[in-house]
Image (spheres, rainbow, N blue to C red):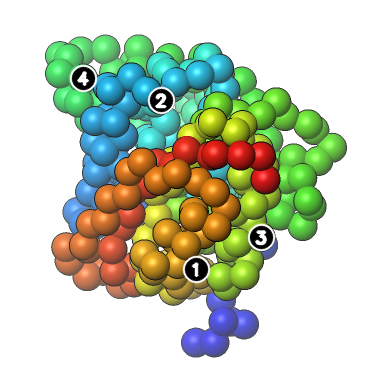
Amino acid sequence: MSSTDLKYYHEHHFESKQFLDAYCSPKADECLLKDVVENPMNCLQKELITGHIHGDMLIDISIGPNICHLMPICKFFKEITVLKFNDLCITELKKWLNSHEEAYDWSHASNLMLDLEEKSGGKQAIEELLKSKIKRVLKCDLSKDSLTDPIVLPKADCIISAWAMETINKDKNDYIINFRKISSLLKPGGRLILFGSFNVSYYIVAGHKYGAVTYDEEFLRKVLKDEEYLTEVFQVKDRETPTDYVDYEKTVFVIALKQREG
């Protein structure tokens, strides 16, 4: 299949619930559930308990209506702004925020959060805390220099992005351009937290094949260096088992400090 035959998350309709079922829920392949939900929450929790990641505003720019990676981090920020590229994902997220009867069930993630905090109960409190911290859900536009134009957001103390950079870019040049747009939303001295995959070219949602930009560790490290980020954490994990849903080779978890205004 050529790149022209592929759909792209930010350009085409995206079946949000089927994406969550395939990658983020107990219905998912065990390997995917571990790599997309369990390991990111665990890695983030271990870094957050050190106390050096906190602030007033967190911006989340992630694929789909996934919110599990926000459960560990939400208590360390006063408010969260969520940016999405897809209307269906915004609708799905708002159902959860408004406790709609058709809202997605995230109890598996909140139960995991309880395990990480070594608590025996209170999964509803975890979700309610996160809901209270999300103050804005906005659609963003990659065609604009300012992603949220005409809305001007205050600079964030931290940006977290889970698998967005793979899926909103068609090639490495796009990656660099959009990295800079996302970086412009972050204060100097703020932290960028990335979850991603190396050497991925496609993923499947509801029977449709979506494209992804293929890159490796050398490329990502160079982007961070060139954009003057100080890398504090760079953890790479090999994929354990194959799946037909997506062809990534490794996952990566990065925390990097922005050293100057871009």
Residue 177 is marked as 3
Q: What residue is rendered at 17% in x and 14% in y?
A: 119
User: Which residue, given by chain and number where applicable, does mark 1 sit on?
Assistant: 212
Please state which of the two labelled residues, at mark 2 or mark 1, is closer to the viewer: 2
Q: Secondary structure at mark 1?
A: loop
- Give the crowd class for mark 3: few <14, some 14-19, many >=20 residues within 10 Å: some
CB under 8 Å between discs 1 and 3? no
**N-terminal-most mark, 1 or 3:** 3
Q: CA distance from mark 3 to mark 2?
A: 26 Å
- Type of the residue with mark 4: Glu
* Residue extending furthest toward the right: 150
**Is the residue 141 above or below the residue 77 in the image?**
below
Q: CA distance from mark 1 to mark 3?
A: 15 Å
Residue 53 is marked as 2
Q: Is residue 197 visible?
A: yes
User: Which residue, given by chain and number where applicable, does mark 4 sit on?
Assistant: 117
- Type of the residue with mark 3: Ile
- Type of the residue with mark 1: Ala
Q: Would you identify the image quadrant in which residue 7 lies?
A: bottom right
Q: Would you identify the image quadrant in which residue 11 lies?
A: bottom right
CB under 8 Å between discs 2 and 1? no
